[in-house]
Image (cartoon, rainbow, N blue to C red):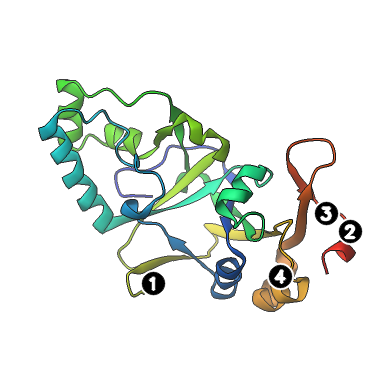
Amino acid sequence: MIGKWSAPVLFDRMRAYHFLSAEYGLQAVEKRQLKVSRWDRLNDPFEFFSLDITDKDFRRSVKAKLRTVNNTTGLICFSKSWKNPVQWSHSADRHHGLCLGFDIDDEHLCPVNYSAERIKSDEKEMASFLNNDPDRITEIIYTKFEHWRYEEEVRMLTTLQDLPKLKDLYFQPFSKIMNLREIIVGANNRSTKPADLRAALGASYNDVSMFKARASFSRFEMVRQQSEALWS
């Protein structure tokens, strides 16, 4: 959620996946929290710039708006699926990392819209943005270039106020709203063992499914390794 820029309803509750390196994934499980991303540190230079900002004055206004939003809000990026091998390569240290699956209330998630074109910014569109039209702001926040489509991204937006903080980093605690249900170990991960995850989970162990991924024998996707002997 992000104040008035809230996400529209998807489902009652959905399983959403967050990819991490092995080190940070294990830390997230141990500390029961995910790091909140900041808009100015995302890996896409077009974040918040899905608008056509050819007009110089409008471009200056959009950059000023981004600074304001960046100081008050953040986001956590999830995927609808854990099976895409490209996602593992780019977001989980080339299949050496972890993927955490959460059950999340629908009101806190919104899917990204993928587009081949920038959002047009004629005088009417500029005015709606500058007047803080919530529909226009929401469209901008959830629009990315179509080549990112493989991520099947859904986003949780959150206000930074009152979140746990370490130096300049903010964290969203696990909760009933964002409930950890799965831990998937990357196919190339040789270091994270079942015992490590059980120790990190503690009393929560019985509530969380844990398994290792492997490459499918018949499709371009990752699947569950059925034999735990091949993991432990």
Which residue does the image show at 22% across and 34% down from the upper left? 133
Judging by the rendered image, the residue that carries numbered circle 2 is 227
* Mark 3 Cα-neighbour bin, 10 Å: few <14, some 14–19, many ≥20: some
Give coordinates of residue 5: x percent, y percent: 32, 43
Question: Would residue 118 be found to the left or right of residue 108 on screen?
Answer: left
Dot 2: what SS?
loop
- Residues at marks 2 and 3 touching, judged by CB atoms closer than 8 Å: yes
Q: Which residue is nearer to you in this view: 85 or 161?
A: 85
Judging by the rendered image, the residue that carries numbered circle 3 is 225
Q: Quadrant of the C terminus?
A: bottom right
Which residue does the image show at 42% across and 24% down from the upper left? 116
Which residue does the image show at 79% across and 51% down from the upper left? 224
Of badges 1 and 2, the one in the foreground is: 2
Give the Cα distance between marks 3 and 1.
36 Å
Question: Would residue 148 be found to the left or right of residue 218 on screen?
Answer: left
Which label number is shown at residue 192? 4
Q: Earlier in the sequence, mark 3 or mark 4?
A: 4
Q: Amino acid at mark 4?
A: Thr
* Mark 1 Cα-neighbour bin, 10 Å: few <14, some 14–19, many ≥20: few
Q: Which residue is nearer to you in this view: 13 or 128?
A: 128
Q: Which residue is nearer to you in this view: 118 or 3?
A: 118
Dot 4: what SS?
loop
Give the Cα distance between marks 3 and 4.
15 Å
Give the Cα distance between marks 1 and 4.
27 Å
Q: Amino acid at mark 2?
A: Ser
Q: Could one spot residue 15 in this view of the protein?
A: no
Judging by the rendered image, the residue that carries numbered circle 1 is 164
Q: Could one spot residue 184 in this view of the protein?
A: yes
